[in-house]
Image (tube, rainbow, N blue to C red):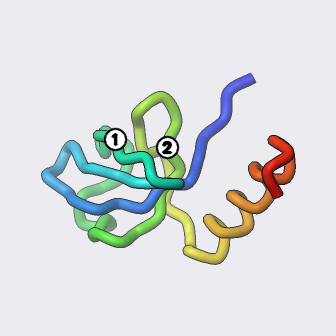
Amino acid sequence: MCVGVPMRLKEINYPVGTAEAEGVEMPVYLHLIPEEELSPGDWVIVHVGFAIQKLRAEEARETWKLLRSALGNA
């Protein structure tokens, strides 16, 4: 099973950015989302190093809540 995780964009140097989640920072490829749609602070779903979709902060929080619950870290 593959899982995409919500991460917050810290820096953008399109087509690459730096994203952070749960204290982990990593480079992410932004090719799949148009540059003009991205800003630092935006939340994106990251799958195998690629940002595949933007999402609202509320959606990101809820997704992390579900992931923590599924992992037994609620």
Give the farthest residue toward the left: 13
Q: Quadrant of the N terminus?
A: top right
Residue 58 image-quadrant placement: bottom right
Residue in front for this viewpoint, 6 or 38: 6
| Residue assigned mark 1 | 26
The location of residue 20, given as percent across then percent down, is 40, 54
Q: Residues within 10 Å of mark 2 (few under 14, many from 20)?
A: many
Residue drawn at (43%, 46%) of the image: 24
- Going from N to C along the chain, the mark reached first, 1 or 2, is 1
Identify the mark at residue 56; answer none if there is no mark.
none
Left or right: residue 63 compared with residue 7: right
Pair 1/2: label in front: 1
Residue in front for this viewpoint, 29 or 36: 29
Residue drawn at (82%, 58%) of the image: 74
Identify the mark at residue 46; answer none if there is no mark.
2
- Kind of residue indicated by mark 2: Val
Q: Is residue 18 above or below residue 57?
A: above
The location of residue 41, given as percent across then percent down, is 35, 72
Residue drawn at (85%, 52%) of the image: 69
